[in-house]
Each structure stands twice: as structure tokens, then as C-alpha cells.
Amino acid sequence: MVHPEDKTRLKQALQRLSAQSAIGLEYRIIDRTGNIRWLKIRAQRNSALAKNQADRIDGVVHDISDQKRVEYHLSYEAYHDNLTALANRNSFIRQSNQLLHAFKENPSERFAVLFIDLDRFKRINDSLGHYVGDQLLQQVAKRLQQCLRPFDLIARIGGDEFAILLKNLSQPEDPIIVAKRIHSQLTEAIRIENQIFFVSVSIGIVIASFRHASAEELLRDADIAMYQAKKEGKARYQLFNESMHIDSVRRLDLERDLRIALNNQEITLHYQPIVNLETQVVTGFEALARWTHPQKGFISPADFIPIAEESGLIVELGEQILRQACHQLKQWNSCFPEVSTYTMSVNLSGKQLQSLSFIDTLDEILNANNISGHQLKLEITESLLMDNHDSILTLLNSLLKRDITLSLDDFGTGYSSLSYLHRFPLSELKIDRSFVSRIEDDIQSQEIVKTILNLANTLNMSVVAEGVETLGQLKYLKILKCNKAQGYLFYKPLSKTDVDKLLEDHANHWMSA
Ligand code: C2E
Ligand code: CA
Ligand code: CA
């Protein structure tokens, strides 16, 4: 009745009994009805007291099937993911640690970790519900499994995150081959209840090395690489390299410091004058964020704004910036009468607009500073318009009702799709500095600027050229009949005190005239 797989073990144990006095063993039998039962045996040999007498073996057999079932269940639960029946994070960590250990004993046993994250899964889950989301995860799990050899391990380690252990690498390119296989395996549509889905994944890859102390470190590096892959556009893979680690540590540091800076209101504004090209007079300012870190010194907004956006801090930061800009405008309005014809342009990030309280906050700030909408311009970027059509349109229209001007920043660098412009209530385009800087010697840039100006003209929008640095550029822009410009040729971004001086000079100039 003994289970074929356990026969040898049992025989060996019984043989051992001739050399030692007691044995203990768990083994399976197959009972008459064909069910497997687990037995636990403890046996001991009492040697014959005298010659010619038989040895006596006695022992106890327990049926431990129930206990085994519970144990199995518990260990299955502990190491598997319910939804996909794949291994779970625990199991992945345990096996990675074993492999890492083996690798350090024998460096020829190379292995890699792949971190896989579904692109845009949240959107599917949110809009179509958890049932569809779950089905999708199950199907993706199956596809991923098909890309692996039997001895590789795949686990679901988080909501829409999977990890793979690729064992016995024969060449460093192996993980890349697998990553490509995964991408091609997923190009085929997934069908769920008569709906068709196309999913893609971003993959981060790390090859285990001596510098990894634990499985958690391997996963962390693969995660960092995955994040990089995502950033460079979705449906990609990325191999981890050391500079990414430094980068991500730096980012975390900066994010922490930014939180402190927000609390201490360390972020201030500079104001870059915008001039009318025909009359050369100042028509307004663009508020630009400035951060002087107490230890690290000046940090460019090009570095900290993206971090604020990713971490969500931009909502609070943006509010502080808007408040500062309006407060400053109020002061200048009251000291210099001509400022009431000026506008203040404030950069806005998409995340700010998505925040539910945005309009209320804006109204509150305008009221508190007694600023009317026509003095405020909000600069937004193309990506914001492309990402969320309908909801954004409603919001932009409610800004328009308040007489606020909407300006499209960095025009030409994003989607370069002109067709959607008329759908949004925009009244100003800002031509990106990259075109302006090449306008003197690059015919293509000239053509682009000319086209943008024509287009703006037909759509009844005004145009601001950004980053004008030379007289040559100015000349071209005038020929092309560009309305306004900003740039070092006219003014750099100025501190509040410098703007005060500028406005005083203007006032004196008008008095004497
Ligand atoms: P942007 O909105 O395109 O701002 C114009 C950038 O060009 C500013 O850089 C400005 O200092 C710089 N600039 C102006 N004239 C010239 C010129 O003649 N030559 C050159 N080489 N550069 C010129 P800055 O202040 O470093 O800001 C960089 C970017 O950071 C901004 O680009 C904007 O995208 C973002 N940013 C700055 N302040 C804020 C803010 O308050 N909120 C948000 N959401 N983003 C901001
Ligand atoms: Ca801007
Ligand atoms: Ca710009």
C-alpha cells in the first residue's frame, strides 16, 4: 500500500533500524479507495536478550493526513497568490535569497530578476471594475508563464506587478531575450467577456551580483530599472545600472527636502518681463519658481518641478506659487498704476488641474488679493490637453468664464499636433526656446515658427517667443510679425526687488516725459 515514491525511503529507514535503535518517518500510503493518506511512524528495535531469540521491533503508526492537509494549505497560502495561483512575494524572496546564496558560493550560477509592471492597469481597473481587472491579471499571468522555462520562477508580488527569477543564465543577454519574448507574447489581444484588450508591460532587469546583500535589494534595483523603462515610454525594458541607483537616492533626498522647503516656504519667485515686440514695452511677467536649498544652494526648477509632480507635492507647491504671484501683483498694482494693464503668467502642472479643489482655491486666492481674472494667465502644456480631454475642457471653460487667459507653453516640443488647438479655449501660444535659438541659421526652424504664427493668426491667438537672446533672433521674429517675446536679450528673470526698481524707473520715465 505504500506510495511508490515513498517505498525506497521506507525500505532504507527499516534497514537503518538494524544499525540504530530508533527511527521516525513520515510517508504516504494509498488506501483501498485510492486515497492518499499520510502516516507517521516511530519504531524501535529491542535487541534480542539472548542468542537464538528474535529481535523485537515495536512502534506506533499515526494517521497524520488531516495535519498534512492543513500544513499544505498553510504553506500554499503563505507562498502563493490567490488570484493567479503563481508564487507570491514571500516565495519569491525566499527563493531569490537561496539563489543569491548559491551564487556567492559558486559565481558561475548567475541569475537575473525581472520586474514587470502593467502599463495603464489602474485605468482599466478603475473604469471597468475589479472583475475585468482580475481576469486581465490572470490572463497576463498565463502569458508570462508561457515565456519561461519550467525551472524559472514567476511570482505576482503586488497589484499589477510580477517578478521573474531567471536561473542558470548562460549569457548576459538571456534576460533581454526573455523580455523581448514577453513583449511579443503580449502583442496579441486579450479577450475578456467579448471585450478586447491590448496590454503592454514595462520591464526592469537586474543581474545578481556580489554587491547585492539580499533579495530585497535585487527587487529594488529591478524596480528602479522598471521605473526608468516606464519613464522612457511604455512597453519597454531596461537593464539596471549603478547610476540609476544614485539617481533614485538623489531623487528621494530631494523629495524629502522639498517637503521641508514647502513647510518653511523656502520656494520663492522670480519674474521675467514679457515685452511687446512692436512697442518694446513690458506687458507682463512670467512667475518662475526659485529654490535656494539651505545646504545644496540653488536648485533648478527643471530638477525639482518634475520631482514635485511625481510625488504629488506640486499641488501644494503650485498653490503656494499662485498665492505668492497674486500677492506680489496686488502690491505692484497698488504702487504702480500702469501695472494694472500688465498680466502675470503662472505655470500650471496637470496634477494641479486634476485636483478637485483647484477652482475653489483659485477663486479664494484671486479674491484675497483683489485680482481680477483678466490679469492672470495660466501656462499649461500640450501633454495636459492630450491626456484627459473632456474633463479638462470643462475646467478650462470655467477658467475662461473668470476672464483668465490660457497660454500653451513650450509649443512645438510636445505632440506637434496642431489639429486639436481649436478645440480648446486657448488665447496664447508660447513658441519653445529650441526653435527661437535656431531661427537665424536653420531654415526648418524658421518654417516652423512661420507656420505657428500663421496658425495662431487664423485661430485668433497671440504668440510669445521664448528665450530670445540675440538681436538676430529679434529681427527675424519682427519680420515674422510675432507679437511678444521674453528672453535674456530683454530681461533675465528678476527678483522682486529688481522688478521694483524696474517699475520705479518706468514711472520716473513717464513722469519726465
Ligand atoms: P518654462 O515655463 O519654459 O520657463 C522658461 C524658462 O526659460 C525659465 O527657466 C527661464 O529662466 C528660461 N529663460 C528665459 N529666457 C531665457 C533665455 O533668453 N535664454 C535661456 N537659455 N533661458 C531663458 P527656469 O526658470 O529654469 O524654468 C524651467 C522650467 O521649470 C520652466 O520652463 C517651467 O516648465 C518649470 N517651472 C518654473 N517655474 C515653475 C512654476 O512655478 N510652476 C511650474 N509648474 N513649473 C515651473
Ligand atoms: Ca512657462
Ligand atoms: Ca516655456
Image: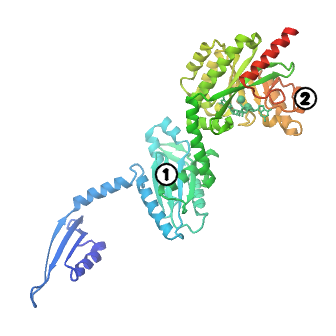
Q: How many numbered marks appear? A: 2
* Residue 151 appears in the picture as rendered: no
Single out the residue that lies furthest toward the bottom: 52
x and y, in percent, of residue 121 in the image: 52, 42
Q: Quadrant of the C terminus?
A: top right
x and y, in percent, of residue 255 in the image: 57, 38
Q: Is residue 19 above or below residue 385?
A: below
Residue at the spot 85% in from the left edge and 22% down from the top edge = 277
* Residue that mark 2 sits on: 475
Q: Is residue 217 left or right of residue 336?
A: left
Note whether ligand 1 is within 8 Å of mark 1: no
Single out the residue that lies furthest toward the front: 295
**Precedes in sequence: disc 1 or disc 2:** 1
SS under mark 2: helix
Mark 1–mark 2 CB contact (< 8 Å): no
x and y, in percent, of residue 51 in the image: 10, 90
* Residue 196 appears in the picture as rendered: yes
Residue at the spot 23% in from the left edge and 59% down from the top edge = 67
Colour setting: rainbow
Q: Say what amino acid the circle numbered 1 marks.
A: Phe
Q: Quadrant of the N terminus?
A: bottom left
> 10 Å neighbourhood of mark 1: few (<14), some, or many (≥20)?
many
SS under mark 1: strand
Q: Is residue 412 above or below residue 461?
A: below
Q: Say what amino acid the circle numbered 2 marks.
A: Lys
Q: Nearer the viewer, residue 236 or 199?
A: 236
x and y, in percent, of residue 88 in the image: 42, 53
* Residue that mark 1 sits on: 162
> 10 Å neighbourhood of mark 2: few (<14), some, or many (≥20)?
few
Q: Is residue 504 above or below residue 475?
A: above
Residue at the spot 61% in from the left edge and 38% down from the top edge = 307
